[in-house]
Every structure is written in structure tokens, then in C-alpha cells.
Image (cartoon, rainbow, N blue to C red):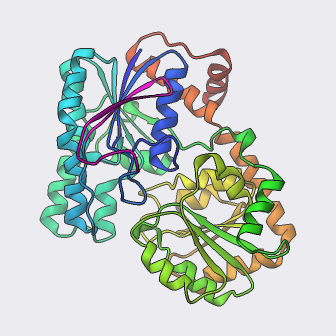
Amino acid sequence: MKVLLYSANYAPEQTGIGKYSGDMAEWMAAHGHEVKVIAAPPYYPAWKVHEGYSGASYLREQMAGVEVWRAPIWIPSKLSGATRMLHLLSFAVSSLPILFRQVFWRPDVVMVVAPAFVCAPGALMASWLSGSKSWLHVQDFEVDVAFRLGVLSGGWKRRLFTALERAIFRRFDCVSSISERMISRAQAKGVKRTRLLSLPNWAGTVSNTMGSEERRAAFRLGWGVGADQVVAMYSGSFGAKHGLDLIPAAAKLLPEVHFIVCGEGVMRPELEARAAELSNLTILPLQPAGDLADFLGSADIHLLPQSEGAEDLVMPSKLTGMMASGRPTVATCRDNTEIARTLHSCGFIVSPGDVHAFADAIRTLALQPDLRREMGARARAYAETNLGKSQILGRLLLDLERLTGLPGSVDQGAGEAAMMERT
């Protein structure tokens, strides 16, 4: 089977969406499929093109059996609604020559990963021209998030973007997303239920995600944290939708807890300024994917702040690694969201923006090591049952076979795991 994956973010060695797309492409290639990827040079979450790449030129490279085509992208120095739109459009436009070149390759399926949703029209056109099936995978409902967070505003803009979004969604042969709430939202946008599929985030190879005690101790020693001191950690992008201002506020209220905030993004300067005033708040760069298991396991408590209203428009990919690490999570979201249901009995849920409730939940876990162990064990059990890479990507291969009508080459173990999950 020939699969063309169209994803602005593609960086298998990193974390987040880039690694998600990378894992997916490499898994398909490893199971006998011919895979090509169209992507921008790696730039996320630091919003800076990685060393060895250029944001102004085209590049073709081979990565773990996958042919990757890189197209130019403009990276704004300051993010706003307008610059973010231009940023995404720059890639959507620059990648069109590569995209339509692949029409002659005649892929069996064109799969676009949103973000960036602006690539969806081109993917549909390429799919039509090549006679292939079209698949839209939604990690974020970008239009809804933009209006909910005020990145975009105005009644006429909402009506226009919503109408365009609905028209595009309905034209894909398959639309998948990472949670049941997000699938329901796609259905509300006009996608027939028969065309909707679940493709949740995974937690790497779950059997290996707890890491080693020695490496976890080494991380803590490097931070200057004592063996008995409680560490509360956030690891992910520093974006506006994450409500990260809660963390330094909670650190000020809890001097006995050491807070680790790891990642890159637009809020980094603000977080660094706050950390300079707090001896118990450490800001770290994004960690290599190979170190992530031990890094996450070095925490006692994980933190998942979210801005109000964004909880069911996105399902944070970072949550899978948190749960697989066997640690409890304190999250900010409403009670009726999918994040809240996923974390039931695995941590605490507090209202978005409520710093005192956030700090109280962290304090409760910090003072009760037995409760931390119980909740962490439940989180780990959930990950083992639901978040294994072989389970989820094995199911993806079966869904690709059903969509295209072509026989695949799913190995017996992956196929059996996927079938067991379906039944």
C-alpha cells in the first residue's frame, strides 16, 4: 500500500505532534507499506527551525525507511492570530508543488494531520487527482480553539471559517481523532458517523515507559532535588492554550514542593522571569525523546493545566506519557470533559484558572505518598490497557486496509492486538 502523509510537523526524534506523525509513518513503513511524507522543517515547539535545516528551501531525505520531503515555512518572530495564519498558509502554499508531484506516484491514501488544517484542501485535491482515498486526522480543532482563546474574533469570521471547515470535513473519505468527544465534535460538523474513526495518542512502547530508577535519581540529582523532596512536573509546549501561569503561582504557594517545567514555546520568557523569583521553580529545555521515559518517571506528580474552554477541543498528547510513567496527574478542566473521565481515580481535577484549588490538589498529593502510589498505579494500568503503540497502530493498519480495500501486511502480533482492542 502507498501512503502519503501530509503533516506540517514531522520530527520523530522529538515529542508532540512531530513525533506522533513520525511514529505513524515509521510504523507503516516497518510493516511493509511504501510511505512518503510532506512536512515543514522541524521547528516546533521552540518556533525556531532546527539546526541542519532551512526554513527557506526544499529538502528530500530518508528517515527510517520513510521518504520525507521538506517544504519552506515562515516562522514569525511574534505570534498573533494574523501571523499564525500566515505561518500555516506559508507551508500550505510552499508544499503544493511537492504535493501535486506525488499525484504521479499514485498513492492509495492521502492522510493529512491537523494541525495544519489549511493543508486539507490541497490534500483533497491531490487525492481526487490521484484517485486515492482521503483521510483527515484531527489532533486539534484549530478553528474552534482560535475563536475560543481569542486568537480570532468576529461574528462574520466565525461564520465564514465554520462554513469552510464543515465543507472540507464532509469531503474526506475518513476522519479520525484522538478522543470520543472530539469524534462527536467532528460528527457535529457534518461528518457521517460511518466515516469517523478513533485514533488516540499512544505512550510509546508501554512496557518500556517507566524507565530506570538509576536514571530517575540522576535527573533529580542534576536538579539539586533531595531524595525526599516532592517534584511536580509539567513537560510539553509553552503555548497560550495551556494555562501555564498557574504553575509559578502554585510554586509561590508551595515552597516545599519543587516544580519542574520543561519545554519550549512562546511563554518561555514569561516563565523564566517568574522562575528567577522562585527558588523552587526550574525551567528546562525540551528533552530528547529517548530520555522522556526516565525524565517523566523522575517526577512525583504531573501537572496538566489547560485554559478554560480548550479541554475538549484538544486531547493533550502529553497525557499518555504522564499516565504511562505511573504517576498521578493534577489537571485543570471541567468535570464533564474527556480529560476528567480519563483521569478518574488517577489524579485530581480542578477548575481552570483556580490557582488555590490547583495548589491544594498538589499539596494533598505531596503529603500523601500512599495516595500518590495508588493513583499512579491506576494510571499505569490504564496506559497498559489502552495506550500501547502496537495496539493503536496495529488498528490503524487494519483501518487503512478497510478504507482502501487493499491487503496489508500487518504482522500477526500487531493484528491480533488490534483485533482484540476492537472486540
Give the percent coordinates (x, y) of residue 376.
77, 59
Considering only vertical position in the picture, is 268 above or below 321?
Answer: below
Residues rendered magenta in the picture: 51-71
The quarter of the picture where residue 92 lies is top left
* In-front residue for pair 66/344: 66
Residue 39 in view: yes
The mark total stands at 0
**Magenta span includes 53:** yes
Residue drawn at point x = 69 percent, y = 50 percent? 293
Give the percent coordinates (x, y) of residue 142.
32, 55
Residue drawn at point x = 62 percent, y = 16 percent? 411
* In-front residue for pair 342/109: 109
Residue 137 relative to residue 100: left or right: right
The quarter of the picture where residue 314 lies is bottom left
Name the quarter where the N terminus is drawn: top left
Residue drawn at point x = 83 percent, y = 54 percent? 213
Give the percent coordinates (x, y) of residue 203.
62, 44
Residue drawn at point x = 62 percent, y = 82 percent? 357
Name the quarter where the C terminus is drawn: top right
The quarter of the picture where residue 10 lies is top left
- Seen as rendered, the residue at the extreme top is 407
**Magenta span includes 402:** no
Give the percent coordinates (x, y) of residue 7.
35, 39
Residue 300 in view: no
Considering only vertical position in the picture, is 213 above or below 253?
Answer: above
Considering only vertical position in the picture, is 111 above or below 168?
Answer: above
* In-front residue for pair 377/75: 75
Residue 268 relative to residue 116: left or right: right
Residue 299 relative to residue 368: left or right: left
Considering only vertical position in the picture, is 24 above or below 411?
Answer: below
